[in-house]
Amino acid sequence: MKRIVTIALLALTVLLAGCSSQPEKVERAYTDAEIKEFALEMLSRSGLPYEEYEKLRRAIENPQHRMSRTSRELDALRDSATRGESRS
């Protein structure tokens, strides 16, 4: 009886070990050039009118401002807006 239980537990252990998932590969971050290339490719497929297409293409190729802000910058903007409202 002990032999059957031992074999069953061993078989179950081997089965579960074989079914466990392999660790996922770590994906590398995309470079700025790759992101820009992808954005231009998606823009070319968008079917926008020429004027809008050119406007967006220029914005992608020559960004004039940062797209995101840090939480500190956002907090500072909120604080300055709050101070400006309280003075009025």
Image (tube, rainbow, N blue to C red):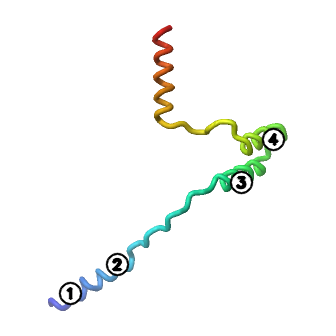
Q: Residues within 10 Å of mark 1 (few under 14, many from 20)?
A: few
Tag 1 or tag 4, which sits nearer the N-term? 1
Q: Residues within 10 Å of mark 4 (few under 14, many from 20)?
A: few
Tag 2 or tag 4, which sits nearer the N-term? 2
Tag 3 or tag 1, which sits nearer the N-term? 1
From the top left corner, tell me how far across and down residue 77 is, in percent. 51, 26
The residue that disc 2 covers is: 17
Tag 1 or tag 2, which sits nearer the N-term? 1
Single out the mark in the foreground, 4 or 1.
Answer: 4
Distance Cα–Cα, label 4 vs label 1: 72 Å
Distance Cα–Cα, label 2 vs label 3: 43 Å
The residue that disc 4 covers is: 54
Distance Cα–Cα, label 3 vs label 4: 15 Å
Tag 3 or tag 2, which sits nearer the N-term? 2
Q: Which of the 4 image quarters holds residue 31?
A: bottom right
The residue that disc 3 covers is: 37
In the rendered structure, which amino acid carries the disc numbered 1? Thr
The residue sitting at 67% across, 56% down in the picture is 34
In the rendered structure, which amino acid carries the disc numbered 4? Glu
